[in-house]
Image (cartoon, rainbow, N blue to C red):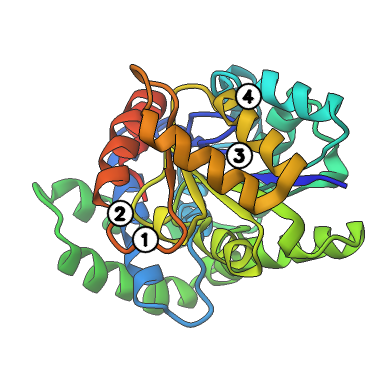
Amino acid sequence: MNVICFDLEGPLSPQDNAYELMKLFPSGGKVFETISRYDDLLTLEARPDYEPGDTLALIAPFLVYHEIKEEAINALARKATLTNGAARLISQLSAQGWKIFCISTSYEQYALHITQRLSIFSQSIACTSFPLDEISQTLCKEDFRYLERMETDILNMYSIDDDWIKKNLDHFYWEELPKTNFGPLLKQVKPVGGQRKVEALKRFAQAQDEPLSNWVVVGDSITDFKMLQAVEQAGGLAIAFNANEYAIPYSTIGLASTHLDDLWPVLEGWRRGKRSAVEKLVKGKERTGGSGDRGYFHWLGGISDIAAPLEIHKRIRHIVREEAAKLG
C-alpha cells in the first residue's frame, strides 16, 4: 500500500486561515504577526507543554473579544483557493490507489471544508477542534480588559522586537490570562502542530498497519518539522514544499514550485523503488534545475548547508503564499 500525508496550509491551500481570520477586525493582522512570532520563539526555546502552531490557541481570546463567530471561519473556507496542481495531484494519487491523509493545525471548520473539496475522507484528517461559539458564551466583558490593553500595546509599538514580544507576551499569557475565564480556554484549544502531528501520523500508521518508513509526508513550516523529522529518520520520504528554514533541515527532499503536481514523478518513483529511486531521480532533476517558477528539486538528506535551496524556496513561497509567506 502507498500512503501519503499532507499538511494543509501551504501544500494544499496557500492561505493562512488564522491570519485571514484575525484580519477581520481592525489591525488584527499586526496582532497575529506578533503572536505568530511569539509562537516561533516559544518553539525555539522548547517551552514545556508548548507545540508549534499553538498560535491557534493564543489568538482564540482575541477572536472572542472581537466577536468573531464560527460562520466567519466557514466563510473563509468557502472563499479559499487551492494550491495550483493540488486537485490534479490528489486525483492522480487516488487513481493509483494511494491512501491519502491530511494532518493540519488549521481549525476544523476550515480543514474539513478544504479537504472535502479535494475528496479526502474526513476519517483521514486530523485537525484542531475549535467550538468557538460555545467558548464565547462562557466569557464576560470583565475578562476583556486584559486583551484590550495588550492589543493597544502591540499596535502602539512602531517596531516590535523579539525581546519585547517575549517579555510582554509571557506575562500576558502565563500570568495575567490564567487569572481570568480565559485560562481554561487556553488549555481547551489544542492545535494539531509539532509533536501532536507526529502522534496523529502514528495513529494513522497504526490503523493502516504501515510503519513510518513506508510513509510520504509533505510539509512546509515550523508546525511540520517534527513530523518531517520522524519520517526522515524512519527512512520514509519527507518532502519540504515551498518550505521555510524550520522545515527544510528535517526533510529528505525539497520542491520549490508554484504547482504541487510537479511532485508526481517523485511519487511515482517512490511507488516503484522507494527511497533509492527517489534519490536518483531528484539528484538528476537537481542537476537540470527548474524552469521559471516551477520544478526546483533538492536532495536534502544529509546536507548541512541549506542556504541554496532555502533561497529558492523563499522566492517561490512568496509567490504562492503572498502575505502568509512571512509567517513561521
* Residue 308 in the image, given as x and y percentages of width and height: 26, 45
Label annotation for residue 306: 2
Label annotation for residue 86: 4
Are circles 2 and 1 on residues that touch, CB within 8 Å?
A: yes
Q: Is residue 92 visible?
A: yes
**Whole-number angstrom distance, CA of label 2 to CA of label 4:** 26 Å
* Residue 8 in the image, given as x and y percentages of width and height: 61, 39
- Label 1 crowd (10 A; few <14 / some 14-19 / many >=20): few
Please give the name of the residue rendered at 63% of the width and 24% of the height, measured from the top-left corner. 86
Query: Is residue 29 shown left or right of residue 81?
Result: left
- Considering only order in the chain, which callout, 4 or 1, is on the residue closer to the N terminus? 4
Are circles 3 and 2 on residues that touch, CB within 8 Å?
A: no
Label annotation for residue 303: 1
**Whole-number angstrom distance, CA of label 3 to CA of label 4:** 10 Å
- The label nearer to you, 3 versus 1, is 1
Label annotation for residue 8: 3
Say which amino acid is labelled 3.
Answer: Leu
- Label 3 crowd (10 A; few <14 / some 14-19 / many >=20): many
